[in-house]
Image (cartoon, grey):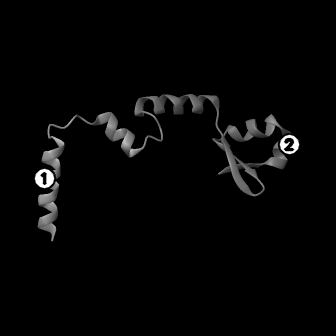
Amino acid sequence: MRTLTAGELKRRGMAAIEEKLRHGPVHLIKRNKPAAVVVSQAEYDRLLRKQSTRGRVGMTALEWLLKHSTPGKKKKTQIDRELRRDREDWR
């Protein structure tokens, strides 16, 4: 993993980032903890293209279900009746 500390970044600036970017993403470290990841413009563009073909990143299961659901054919009273029957069978 290519890392760059905040101190080194302050001292060397963009030269430090550019040097490490030649070999892939650069992980920035601040106070001994990961703070950010820097990627090249080409890699960033690739990630955006990939994201747009797969849908929104971070979609919740509920959002996915709502997006892909079809309206049901049963009425609420019928669903309630079936649920009561199922619950009785569990006892």
The location of residue 64, given as percent across then percent down, is 36, 39
Q: Which residue is mark 2?
A: 10
Q: Is residue 84 left or right of residue 52?
A: left
Viewer-proximal residue among 31 and 65: 65
The answer to whether the residue labelled 1 contacts the one labelled 2, judged by CB atoms less than 8 Å apart, is: no
Q: Is residue 57 above or below residue 42?
A: below
Residue 56 quadrant: top left
Residue 22's disc is none
Viewer-proximal residue among 33 and 90: 90
The location of residue 75, given as percent across then percent down, is 15, 40
Mark 1 is surrounded, within 10 Å at the Cα level, by few (under 14), some (14 to 19) or many (20 or more) other residues, namely few
The location of residue 49, given as percent across then percent down, is 49, 28
Q: Residue at x 23, y 34 (%)?
A: 70
The C terminus, quarter of image = bottom left
Q: Which residue is mark 1?
A: 81
Q: Residue at x 85, y 40 (%)?
A: 12
Say which element carries label 2: helix
Say which element carries label 1: helix
Label 1, label 2: how far apart the Cα atoms are: 68 Å
Q: Residue furthest front?
A: 77
